[in-house]
Image (spheres, rainbow, N blue to C red):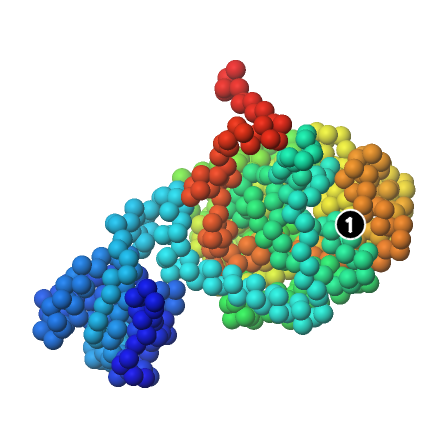
């Protein structure tokens, strides 16, 4: 390395290294680095600047006694977030000056020249301040993204993209793009609609999934397709959802569920290894939908901890406790969870758990404190004698020191409430390990789910999912049998999040027509929404199956974050708006005229 550096045509220093690349092996070498001023400290004998780029941090020293005053003045002028260039020599720090919190902490740069490339006003918030409101961070997202943790998240996301592409290409898949402007379908979540200027009064829909197109690719003989696809759903947002999201979309011909499982286990295992250096088991455990509901109350169980649901309906089948008896008489159940070591949980915190359960449909909770000395304290003591309470505790596998929480209602509500409660309790106990991943396949889903409100069945996954061969006869008998039909569908759940879902598809026109008939999708609706797929069935359609993995959710798990927005460069907030760009916004009336659209505003609340 020489002391001669290159200067760009515009006069800007040309860097030789990234900040985080510098280490003790470069001691004595002259280097040039550029980046943002992370910190500046003015001490009596020296000015220190910590410089930051996406690779990390490094410290630059300006010795006031040995450095020319104009250079020291430049260092003093450089405030936080100034963009600067530094030329200098890599120097080993003294043993007592090593910064063990920085990857480059064994060295520092002795400045020989400095260039202020771009000045910066005082930012609206300090990057390292954890107390900044989220709406402020998102308004200035380009500043927020300078934070090392978010830079790391984007790097991990990049690794997921590259690993996915390489793996699937090596497995013989073709990457093929499908349309973003498509047609609206009669099933699923609400579509985002795009008006057509050239077809007045008609609309495109942004795809909720490339489902129909990837099935058409199988009809085309592509055999193995994948796409890292943008998808859109106009639905209420949660911490693990965004209105526009990215999925790893896969479809294959002439496969069964075992083929899909084997491929996806290798793909997900590769992603976790390459992006997070975590070794998943080669084969993931499996659990049927019914088992998951019975044991955990949800079809996406978090298996990092126990606290399984326990049915005590038989034990309390006859009692004077109206809450339990009423639920059982109405065909419901009484179930509970045992919280290890929490018998002395303060009443205020128990009340908070009761309110949490109510937020998930429960009318309330009963509880039993099984004290360390064997004493039993309970809200239901006046309805059950000590022997009966001990029987309940035995059934719940409770030990002295444990807390038992009980819920009585229709079984669906009990599952919803206790399924959410066990996770909430685990969060409060601090037993959820973000560095531990527990994948599980959930299988044997119901093909259909019944809506009391609409008095009809809906597809549990989507209307192209094939039923289990053993259950085909129930499609003909109909009636209550329809609720018992199992689907050739599967979800991969990791730490309580559905990270991948898929199914084996219907590939016969007669079966697809039968499915539409059960779902009360008229021939006209089917033709309007899916006519191109139905037409393809006429010309030799292969058996197919596939899956779609939520890339955003996978990144969220890998980054240890509880919110998808932290792994997306420019996310939306809860009302699906973007604080940075102010989208959605009003448009020029001329644009609306070109689309033959007039806008009406909703009535004010209370009118």
| Left or right of 54 on screen, residue 420 | right
Identified at 72% across, 34% down, the residue is 451
**Is any atom of residue 492 visible in this view?**
no
Question: Where residue 55 sits: x, y (%)?
Answer: 39, 68
| Rendered-image quadrant of the N terminus | bottom left
Identified at 65% across, 50% down, the residue is 299
- State the image quarter where residue 56 is shown: bottom left
* Residue nearer the viewer, 130 or 70: 70
- State the image quarter where residue 54 is shown: bottom left
| SS at circle 1 | loop
Query: Which residue is at the far front?
Result: 9
Question: Where residue 286 sits: x, y (%)?
Answer: 69, 61
* Residue nearer the viewer, 309 or 169: 169
Question: Where residue 35 sits: x, y (%)?
Answer: 32, 64
**Mark 1 crowdedness (10 Å alpha carbons): few <14, some 14-19, many ≥20:** many
* Residue nearer the viewer, 309 or 192: 192
Question: Where residue 94 sits: x, y (%)?
Answer: 21, 80
| Left or right of 479 on screen, residue 283 | left
* Residue nearer the viewer, 542 or 408: 542
Residue tagged by mark 1? 465
From what the image shows, is residue 186 above or below residue 93? above
Identified at 49% across, 53% down, the residue is 568
**Is any atom of residue 148 visible in this view?**
yes
| Left or right of 189 on screen, residue 89 | left
Report the label total: 1
From what the image shows, is residue 200 above or below residue 579? above
Identified at 73% across, 59% down, the residue is 251
């Amino acid at each position: 390395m020489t002391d001669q550096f290159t200067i760009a045509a515009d006069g800007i220093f040309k860097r030789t290294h990234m900040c985080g690349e510098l280490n003790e092996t470069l001691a004595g070498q002259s280097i040039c680095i550029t980046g943002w001023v992370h910190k500046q400290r003015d001490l009596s004998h020296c000015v220190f600047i910590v410089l930051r780029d996406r690779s990390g941090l490094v410290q630059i020293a300006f010795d006031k006694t040995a450095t020319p005053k104009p250079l020291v003045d430049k260092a003093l002028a450089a405030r936080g977030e100034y963009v600067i260039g530094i030329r200098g020599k890599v120097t080993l720090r003294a043993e007592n000056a090593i910064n063990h919190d920085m990857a480059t902490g064994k060295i520092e740069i002795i400045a020989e020249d400095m260039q202020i490339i771009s000045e910066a006003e005082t930012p609206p918030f300090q990057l390292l301040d954890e107390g900044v409101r989220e709406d402020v961070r998102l308004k200035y997202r380009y500043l927020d993204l300078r934070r090392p943790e978010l830079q790391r998240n984007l790097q991990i996301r990049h690794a997921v993209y590259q690993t996915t592409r390489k793996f699937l290409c090596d497995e013989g898949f073709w990457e093929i793009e499908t349309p973003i402007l498509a047609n609206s379908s009669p099933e699923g979540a609400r579509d985002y609609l795009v008006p057509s200027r050239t077809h007045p009064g008609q609309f495109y829909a942004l795809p909720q999934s490339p489902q129909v197109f990837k099935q058409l690719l199988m009809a085309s003989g592509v055999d193995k397709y994948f796409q890292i696809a943008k998808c859109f759903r106009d639905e209420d947002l949660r911490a693990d959802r965004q209105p526009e999201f990215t999925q790893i979309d896969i479809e294959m011909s002439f496969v069964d569920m075992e083929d899909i499982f084997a491929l996806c286990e290798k793909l997900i295992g590769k992603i976790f290894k390459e992006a997070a250096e975590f070794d998943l088991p080669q084969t993931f455990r499996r659990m049927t939908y019914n088992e998951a509901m019975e044991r955990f109350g949800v079809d996406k169980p978090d298996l990092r901890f126990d606290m399984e649901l326990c049915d005590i309906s038989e034990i309390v089948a006859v009692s004077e406790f109206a809450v339990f008896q009423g639920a059982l008489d109405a065909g419901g159940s009484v179930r509970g969870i045992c919280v290890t070591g929490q018998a002395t949980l303060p009443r205020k915190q128990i009340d908070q758990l009761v309110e949490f359960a109510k937020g998930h449909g429960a009318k309330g909770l009963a509880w039993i404190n099984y004290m360390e000395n064997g004493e039993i304290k309970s809200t239901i003591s006046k309805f059950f004698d000590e022997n009966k309470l001990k029987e309940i505790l035995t059934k719940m596998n409770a030990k002295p020191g444990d807390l038992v929480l009980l819920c009585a209602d229709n079984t669906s509500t009990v599952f919803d409430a206790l399924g959410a409660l066990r996770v909430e309790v685990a969060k409060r106990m601090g037993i959820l390990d973000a560095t531990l991943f527990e994948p599980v396949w959930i299988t044997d889903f119901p093909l259909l789910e019944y809506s009391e409100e609409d008095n009809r069945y809906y597809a549990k996954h989507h209307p192209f999912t094939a039923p289990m061969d053993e259950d085909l006869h129930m499609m003909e008998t109909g009636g209550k049998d329809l609720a018992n039909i199992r689907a050739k569908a599967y979800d991969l759940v990791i730490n309580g999040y559905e990270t991948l879902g898929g199914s084996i598809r219907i590939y016969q026109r007669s079966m697809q027509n039968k499915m539409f008939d059960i779902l009360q999708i008229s021939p006209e609706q089917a033709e309007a929404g899916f006519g191109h797929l139905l037409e393809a069935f006429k010309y030799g359609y292969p058996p197919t199956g596939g899956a779609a993995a939520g890339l955003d959710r996978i990144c969220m798990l890998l980054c240890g974050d509880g919110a998808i927005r932290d792994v997306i460069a420019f996310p939306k907030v809860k009302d699906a708006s973007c604080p940075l760009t102010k989208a959605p916004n009003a448009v020029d009336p001329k644009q609306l005229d070109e689309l033959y659209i007039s806008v009406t505003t909703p009535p004010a609340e209370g009118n």
